[in-house]
Structures are given as structure tokens and as C-alpha cells.
Image (spheres, rainbow, N blue to C red):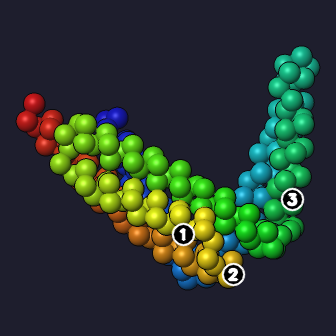
Amino acid sequence: MNVFRECATDVVLCIAELIAGILLLLDPVRFASTVITGAGLVLIVLGLIKVGNYFRTDAETAALGQLLTKGLISILAGAFCVMQWEWFFVTFPVLAMACGSLILLTGISKIQLAVDMVRLKNSQWRLAAVNAVLTLICAIVVLCNPFASTEVLWLFTGVTLVGVGIFDLAVVILRRKAKGRDAYES
């Protein structure tokens, strides 16, 4: 059951990558502004929960947890995202570096997966290795920032997410088949 839950989580993440990539390709500015605004709303709700928990928690525990401070900062950050989402487009170079860094970290974790598959004698390791290399190449392209506008970066990111999502889904399926075959042979 635990293997099934792990596989289902991986498939859901692959589908989320594909959906995000497709939405970025369809309308990158609207998608990005919606994500920023949505993140802002989530921060506001989490901040309100922390503030509420601060007043429901005994004074000593609340003081040690800094719940009021964390809650107020979260509310302010969320309000900024909701009311000033355009700011994120103005600060495009910083966002490009953050996006590229996240893609790079994902690529590094995919190297781990490919090496783990080799060590576990999974014959499908080559697909995972190609996936890792492609992810790293995309990260390098984003980090070198050859893009003239935010919209072009989001389009490139959309293409990257769709491609990586397809490869991730293939790796999950092949890894699942290999686990099933190994369990059957045992």
C-alpha cells in the first residue's frame, strides 16, 4: 500500500507539472499573476491561523513560538502579493534566478534518482539520467538568462515543465513496472 501511495504521489506531481506547463504556454502573464495572487491569499490565511493560534495558546508557549510575529509577517507578505503582484514582473531578473535555481535543484535530485536506479540494478536508469540532464540544461539556460522579457521566460518555463513532466511520468511508470517485476521474481 505504501508503494502505491508513493507512486500515486509521484503521478500527481507529474500531472501538476504538465498542467502548470500547459497553462504557462497558454497565457504566461495571467498564469503567473494568478499564482502570485493565490500564494498571497494562502499566506494571508496561514497568517490569520497563526495569529488565531497565538491567542488560543497559553502565554508562555505562544511567546516562545513567535506565532504573532510569524502570523503578522505572513499576512503582510500575502497582502503584498495580492495587491502588488505586478512588482514580481518588474523584478524579473531575480525571479529568473530563483526559478533557475529551483530547476537546478530539481535536476540535482534527479541525478540522485538515476544513480539510485543504477545501484538498484533497474534497467530503466537511462531514462532517468536523460531526464536529469535535460533538467540541468534547462536550469543552465534559465540561469544564463537570455530572455528579453518575463513572458518569454514563462513560455520557456512552460515548455520545460511539460517536457520534464512527460519524462517524470515515464520514469515513474517504468520504475513502478520494475518494482512489480522485482517483487514477482522474488
Mark 2 burial class by Cα count in 10 Å: few <14, some 14-19, many 20+: few
- Residue 146, position in %: x, y? 61, 77
Residue drawn at the location 47% of the way across and 49% of the way down = 108
- Residue 184, position in %: x, y? 10, 37
Residue 141 got which mark?
1
The answer to whether residue 52 is seen in the rendering is: no
In space, the residues marked 3 and 2 are separated at their CA atoms by: 26 Å
Mark 1 burial class by Cα count in 10 Å: few <14, some 14-19, many 20+: some
Q: Cβ–Cβ below 8 Å for labels 3 and 1?
A: no
Residue drawn at the location 46% of the way across and 54% of the way down = 107
Mark 2 vs 1, N-terminal side? 1
- Quick check: 141 left or right of 71? left
- Residue 83, position in %: x, y? 87, 67
- Quick check: 136 left or right of 116? right
- Tally the numbered discs: 3
- Residue 43 vertical position relative to residue 186 in the rendered view, above or below: below
The answer to whether residue 142 is seen in the rendering is: yes
Q: Residue tagged by mark 3?
A: 79
Q: Residue tagged by mark 2?
A: 149
